[in-house]
Amino acid sequence: MKKNKQRKISLMSYLSKYKFGVFSYILVYLIAGACTVLQTIYMAQAISYITDLGNKLMLAIYTLLFIAGLVLVKRVCWFISGYLYQKYANNIMADMNLDLAKQAFRLSSKTYADHDTGTFVQRIVKDPELVVGRLADMVDFITDLLTSLVIVIYITTLNIYIGIIIFAIVAVGLTLEFFRNKKKRVNRRDTRKKNDKINSLTTEIVRSEKDIKSLGLEEKLSEVSKSNYDEYKKSSYKTEMTDICFWSARNFIVEFVGILMLALGVYFIDLGLLTLASFMIIYSNNGNLYSFIWILGNIADNFVEIRVCSERMMSLFDESIFPCEHFGTKSVEEVKGEIIFKNVSYSYVEYADEEEEDETKKKKKKKKERKIESVNKIFDNLSFKIEPNTTVAFVGKSGSGKTTILNLMSKMYDVDSGEVLIDGININDLDKQSLRSTISLVNQFPYIFDMTIRENLLLAKKDATEEELESAIKRASLSEFVGTLKKGLDTKVGESGIKLSGGQKQRLAIARALLRNSPIIIFDESTSSLDNFAQEDIKHSIDNMKGQSTIVIVAHRLSTIKNVDKIFFLDDGKIVDVGTFDELFENNIKFKNMFYAENLEN
């Protein structure tokens, strides 16, 4: 089985694509920074002219006019930088979003089943936005850092003793920032993970608000939400308190040094080691010392955020964490529809949360293997055969493995061992196009897109004619409903098909599958939400399709599969009986009891 080629995401690859814009953005910021440095130096010169006892008033005025020009240039540079950011940052972010979304399509269905929705949404949407924003901030902060550094060096040239004190405080500040960000990096990862859980739960609540209200789950889910938010608040509080403790120590030292510099300035003036003009320059730029350490902290903060977000994005490309689908290279033009399971074994494996950096052992390297929490064996050497253009059904109690068979059959899940064959070809050897065009799947809870009915149908076959569309909705028992709509097929159905009932969603999904006209059509309890009349219509439609495609049905209602060619009866991951409806009804007591129980419910 050939593995799909995947391009690992790299920040530099995105930045290099827009290197002219990135270079221009950095350049104008550096020019603005240079203007700030010159502004400080010439302002010092102007102060010197003004305080000089000689007649240097005109020189002071010319210097101030030059400073005004520097301020104008600086403001223009900031305007240009804002323009460049809006022009290029959105492009870079959109490219990241697109690549991550494409990678999300490559992930296996099992991967999605193993993780929360928020895990993917945050990585695809939020993390690129944070990375691009923080990269822009880094340019700003680094420019400001260089500016402050030059000014601090300039102050040092005015008095070496004060300069030594300044650089000693910078060393202390750097030490504090090192320990703060080492601690914050761990806390930040935990906070983002907690935020993923909140986003997942919020998405579920929004999508299932009707079920929540009808079942009276508001209070229960409010408790769950509160618990998640409490966990997030604790993690966030821990992160913020780390910052507050370190910042408090840093700010105290800086402010204490400011007072010390004032006292030393007066002392040095008294000794004749410092002029009044130099003292005014030093004290007026005292804030640059605070800015220097503060900017160092911001650079460290941004580095942590960029590193955490980048790791989260890149992890989507790491198959040890998020396994992808893999397809073969064999292409088939015509498929008859024979399906064979040959000694198939499959287990459902649950993993612990994704790995974190092992800070306790001071390791920089991540653990690559995911920890297995539990293994649930579903099938062991399962074998059966479905003849082409026959209609078969799988029945059995909940948890017997019916839906898992369909997932293995459609390669949503990969077998642990054994083979799934279509027309004698292992589905792992088929290329993606051949496999996906061969099978249409109608799920129990189909997803309907926020489009019109027509657009939802055309997703299955973009060049479908009006006659084909009408035939599909008629065969799916949707014609009567569409006829009541003012805009007919051009009616928008809302996000997730919110404007449709459960049965209408399923009928629309069935119409999409019928429109594809695949050699194999799978119905996963697709009539479970339909009323008895619609159920009969769908049953009639499926009966009309007999002989044209291989139809595989997982049935919740046994009454819907009376006319199938063969029924596989599952129990505890094994096929314990095979036959027609009448044969199983006569010879299998469990099947007969299931049918009676269903009719008693009805």
Image (spheres, rainbow, N blue to C red):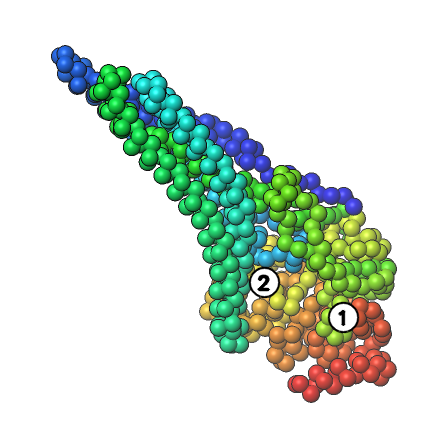
Frontmost of labels 1 and 2 is 1
Indicate the position of residue 353 as horizontal and vertical percent values. Answer: 63, 54
Horizontal side of residue 398 vs 338, given as left or right: left
Quadrant position of residue 467: bottom right
Q: Is residue 593 above or below residue 569?
A: below
| Dot 2 amino acid type | Tyr
Quadrant position of residue 42: top left
In the foreground, 311 or 168: 168
- Disc 1 is placed on an element classified as loop
What residue do we see at 46% from left, 27% from top? 23
What residue do we see at 60% from left, 39% from top? 9
Q: Is residue 401 at all visible to an observer of this figure? A: yes
Horizontal side of residue 581 vs 84, given as left or right: right
Horizontal side of residue 117 vs 289, given as left or right: right
Residue extending farthest bottom = 600
Q: How many marks?
A: 2
Which numbered dot is residue 444? none
Quadrant position of residue 442: bottom right
| Dot 1 amino acid type | Ser
Which numbered dot is residue 447? 2
Horizontal side of residue 536 vs 389, given as left or right: left
Q: Residues within 10 Å of mark 1 (few under 14, many from 20)?
A: many
Q: Is residue 215 above or below residue 85?
A: below
Indicate the position of residue 470 as horizontal and vertical percent values. Answer: 59, 66
Q: Residues within 10 Å of mark 2 (few under 14, many from 20)?
A: some
Indicate the position of residue 327 as horizontal and vertical percent values. Answer: 74, 48
Dot placed on the residue nearer the N-terminal end, 1 or 2: 1
Q: Is residue 448 above or below residue 531?
A: above
Residue that numbered label 1 is attached to: 400
In the foreground, 48 or 521: 48
Q: Is residue 546 at all visible to an observer of this figure? A: no
